[in-house]
Amino acid sequence: MFMVSIVSTVAYLGLDARAVEAQVQLTPGLPAFVVVGLPDKAVGESRERVRGAIAAIGLSLPPKRISVNLSPADLPKEGSHYDLPIALALLGAMGVIDAETLSSYVFVGELGLDGRLAPSPGVLLAALHAAEVGKGLVCPVAQGPEAAWASGIEVLAAPDLIALLNHFRGRALLAPPVPGEVEARAAGPDLKQVKGQETARRALEIAAAGGHNLLMVGPPGAGKSLLAACLPGILPDLTPAEALEVSMIASVAGELNEGRMVRSRPFRSPHHSASMAALVGGGIRVRPGEVSLAHLGVLFLDELAEFQRVGLDSLRQPLETGKVSVARANAHVTFPARVQLIAAMNPCRCGHLGDPALACSRAPRCAADYQAKVSGPLLDRIDLHVEMAAVTAADLVLPPPAEGSAQVAVRVTAARDVQTERYAAVPVRTNAEADGELLDRVATPDDPGRALLAQAAEAMRLSARGYTRILRVGRTIADLDGSDGVHRVHVAEALSYRRRAPTA
């Protein structure tokens, strides 16, 4: 009977790390090196990297048939992080290292031909999985700070294969890594830089306070992009639990910088040429898209009408459900996508619809054609619609506004604290997520407010979704006012930000 050497590793499906065994068996026969178990091209090529790394430490492969099985065999295996577990399982089968020592760890890491360990995506997920199963984790030294965020486990961060073998033999022990630093909040523009857009500033504050989606429509130079860039500066930091969620997504995407835990909310601004896969996720190796990388933060789509329509419409379901599912023939991968959509666009292609001196000869027909590139169902999912006028020279010479981001952030944080307390017993974070009976309980207006809302719903031809979003925005405006109830004045302001349905 031939012995099988087994080493634990993981496969990533979305933010789920599945247990995988790298099983290696040496049998008589013609020399061969075979990897089975639904490996992708990167896993299949691990044979050459493992062969080179083992040669780099002064060993040669035995002249036997080397069979590598990645179990369970029906689970797709993607990525280069299988190199290290395959190499160690092979060394265990060769008798170079004790198999019992290997059984206490989960291994991830890419091998270079010289035996060095290179970073691979998803180490934070692997560390959390190791903590769940009661094992340690072995990973590349560059990702030790990332893995160290998983408390209660032993983390070995090795620079190369020979250093790892020396540690297991007791010749030169590896120092335990320390968790990476908390990433500092990036400095952005201040709201004091925004002049002459009081309505848009107010809408941005409401959007920040309740996590609402916002669309700004205005001519070039009106300050739409500047306002969007100011939003991270007035949003509260992530809680520790939220920071872990965001960091896990960044880890599986390979974007967790030097193991630093993310505490500021993500701000993603993809170019309008982005494909559907880039926006919602997918590709040959399924990875999170922009809508997932912006989870619990901001997804800013500048020049909204210039995006591919199929890409924009693919955002409709994530905006409603807070998650995105990427379907493949052999697997379904789900990523979280609870984002705040901030969009900006010109009113027409030339951008000067409201200025007869600058508007093109096709106005106003060009505006209807241009704005029709964005579907009605997507626009219906946007809570706040703001039309911005051009900034005049008279606005620019005025002194900066008295209030900047710091003052607005205080009100936003206070409103968010109210919502945190209100929704403490339910899986809801902000007013923008409240729905059904919960929304009726916390956001139903008083009698004058209900009368106004009923009248406006008929006149504006609000959809059921639009009606619900008016309630959510009204609740946020009341929170900013420090009001326990939603009153007529709150409903009136919420209605002022609602896009009217087109007439026949």
Image (cartoon, helix red, strand yellow):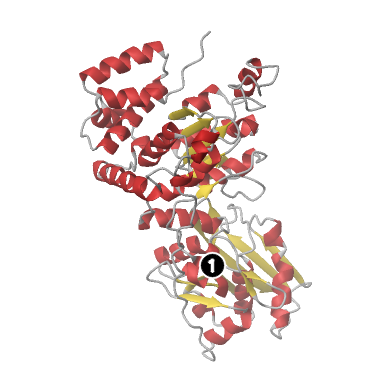
Residue 55: % across, % down: 73, 81
- Where 377 falls versus 139 (above or below)? above
Q: Tag 1: residue type?
A: Glu
Front position in the image: 449 or 275: 449
Tell me if 458 is positioned left or right of 14 in this view: left
Q: Residue at x 43, y 30 (%)?
A: 384
How many labels sit on residues? 1
Tell me if 316 is positioned left or right of 452 in this view: right
- Where 380 falls versus 190 (above or below)? above
Looking at the image, the residue that sits furthest to the right is 30
SS class, disc 1: helix
What is the quadrant of the N terminus in the image? bottom right
Residue 230: % across, % down: 47, 46
Looking at the image, the residue that sits furthest to the bottom is 171
Q: Residue at x 65, y 41 (%)?
A: 274
**Mark 1 neighbour density, 10 Å: few (under 14) some (14–19) many (20 or more):** some
Q: Is residue 328 visible?
A: no
Front position in the image: 203 or 455: 203
Looking at the image, the residue that sits furthest to the top is 504
Residue 442: % across, % down: 25, 32
Where, by quadrant of the figure, is residue 276 drawn?
top right
Where, by quadrant of the figure, is residue 39 drawn?
bottom right
Q: Which residue is mark 1?
A: 258
Residue 364: % across, % down: 62, 16
Front position in the image: 278 or 345: 345
- Where 217 falls versus 409 (above or below)? above
Q: Residue at x 59, y 36 (%)?
A: 221
Q: Is residue 51 visible?
A: yes
Tell me if 63 is positioned left or right of 8 in this view: right
Q: Residue at x 49, y 63 (%)?
A: 124
